[in-house]
Image (tube, rainbow, N blue to C red):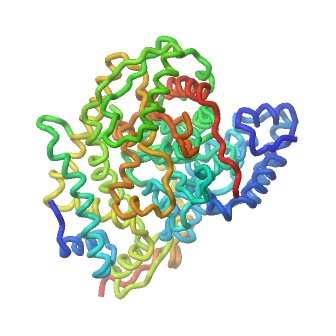
Amino acid sequence: MSVDLSTVKRVAHLARIKVTEEEAEGLRGELNTILGFVEQLQEVDVEGVEPMTSVAAMTLKMRADEITDGAKAADIVANAPLSEDNFFLVPKVVE
Amino acid sequence: MTDLTSLTIAEIGDGLAAKSFSAVELTEAYLSAIEAANDALNAYVAVTPDKARDMAKASDERLAKGEGGTLEGVPLGIKDLFATEGVHSQAGSHILDGFLPRYESTVTANLWADGAVMLGKLNMDEFAMGSSNETSYYGPVVSPWRAKGSNTDLVPGGSSGGSAAAVAANLCAGATATDTGGSIRQPAAFTGTVGIKPTYGRCSRWGIVAFASSLDQAGPIARTVKDAAIMLKSMASVDAKDSTSVDIAVPDYPAAIGESVKGLKIGVPKEYRVEGMPEEIEKLWQQGIDWYRDAGAEIVEVSLPHTKYALPAYYIVAPAEASSNLARYDGVRYGLRVDGDDIIGMYEKTRAAGFGREVKRRIMIGTYVLSAGYYDAYYLRAQKVRTLIKRDFEDVFAAGVDAILTPATPSAAFGIADQEMNSDPVKMYLNDVFTVTVNMAGLPGISVPAGLDTKGLPLGLQLIGRPFDEATLFKAGQVIEDAAGAFKPERWW
């Protein structure tokens, strides 16, 4: 499978990365090189093989349903580029 | 007095106990060494002299009261991927500009609780994506090693290139590192240092910037096998904040060193004899086999038939997980923000400006293989192949093999801005061909310096162990260290 320029642009938009025409062209070649490399997986017989969901045979741990943390709003917004009264500020999303 | 920065962690412990020097003197020696070397090597992206001096002073006070921990007064460098409270933690990326965590990673907290001293944060490939430390926003790390009679700058490997270079150049006594596909073991091999990636779940991942969550593990890079054992004993723990960390008691790793390897069964996988492997690597591997035979171990040929599929499967699984993990860098909660016409425009411009080329490439691959219609063909198939890779190892261990011996890398270090490596992303990815299988199967792997090539550059051998059997790797790794000796770069910086 190989990707064309419009697919590269669509994927870039899905990934929320702005790409110039020139970058998209470069990425097309690079992605096709990588996709060509992973193509060899098609020759592996995976009939009846379970996909890995965890490298170690373990059950995900459960914890007691209790409040163990919180009241850290100021810490959480401390690194925000823009914030006000412990809220993150973003460009308007609803009219 | 001998140069304090040349002491191993084990020797530091003895020296401090004997009051031959103080923790403050030791830290000052390292701060001077960093000051003199960092312009040339670019190993540190941030040095924390005030914090280091305060921590060293506190260590001296604890030592005076007889309360020293296992790493008391030991000056360490920390990979920029670990969150350290109030200190530069940017994963070598532009997109985390100015980020100062309000919390400490579990691994570093464990080290400080045992008395270690932080010297600063170490350079790395951006988001740990790279094998040469050239993708860092802060520029490449220059290896302290050079080929005989050459002035060409070489890469220290990656992604933990700053960690490996700093340890090799005596700019810290040991360093934290992380390994997703070989990022501890490959740079260790390139710089003549010891690096271990423990079993998945051995160290808590809490507070470590996520790259590929099912593969990422923290581990140490150190100058000797014993130092690596001392560090890992401190770093490993079960942690309520990482549900994949494993509740198995941490063994006394340093105690395993020196035990005999007589009767140990060492597997040699025939599939690792890859096409085009340099003769020197082949020779080194044979040398390793001979050392183990001489030490009384039993050598058996083993087969890991799906080895060649590990790297292609990795380049689906790791980018897929990365594309998801890196979705959080959106210019809203931390780091860089570039304004746009609307919120989508802001996301797109922020991520375009904040991520480097390699990171964008991998996010794109990950987004593509997870996108509608392709999931089964790529991601699901790769996860099935991963099951087969793991099964290969399980079969070998079930047959009684205790550890598997392989080369650590397919070559010695290459030059910075190497034409061939940079023209083809897959060429660069092939650096991890011997290490990536271990991450795919969640196993522990150690790289130990084993010799120099004809140009005088270090080469490493890798030992792969059973899950949670790091102790055997330390015990067996010491055999290589005893036989090969230590390798230090000649100082030119």
Q: Residue at x 53, y 56 (%)?
A: B155
Quadrant in the picture for the C terminus of chain B: bottom right
Q: Residue at x 46, y 43 (%)?
A: B217
Q: Is residue A2 visible?
A: yes
Say how many tags the image has: 0
Q: Is residue B367 above or below residue B207?
A: below
Estimate the x, y position of residue A94 in percent, counting from the top left.
30, 83
Q: Is residue B241 visible?
A: no
Q: Out of B294 and A9, give the one closest to the viewer.
A: B294
Q: Is residue A51 above or below residue B103?
A: above
Q: Is residue B386 above or below residue B351?
A: above
Q: Residue at x 54, y 16 (%)?
A: B295
Q: Out of B14 and B202, give the one closest to the viewer.
A: B14
Q: Out of B286 and B292, give the one closest to the viewer.
A: B286
Q: Horizontal placement of B437 versus B484: left or right?
A: left
Q: Quadrant of residue B283?
A: top left
Q: Out of A56 and B190, give the one closest to the viewer.
A: B190
Q: Quadrant of residue B487?
A: top right
Estimate the x, y position of residue B144 in percent, counting from the top left.
63, 53
Q: Residue at x 55, y 46 (%)?
A: B455
Q: Horizontal placement of A10 versus B97: left or right?
A: left
Quadrant in the picture for the N terminus of chain B: top right
Estimate the x, y position of residue B229 in percent, counting from the top left.
60, 32
Estimate the x, y position of residue B320 in percent, counting from the top left.
30, 56
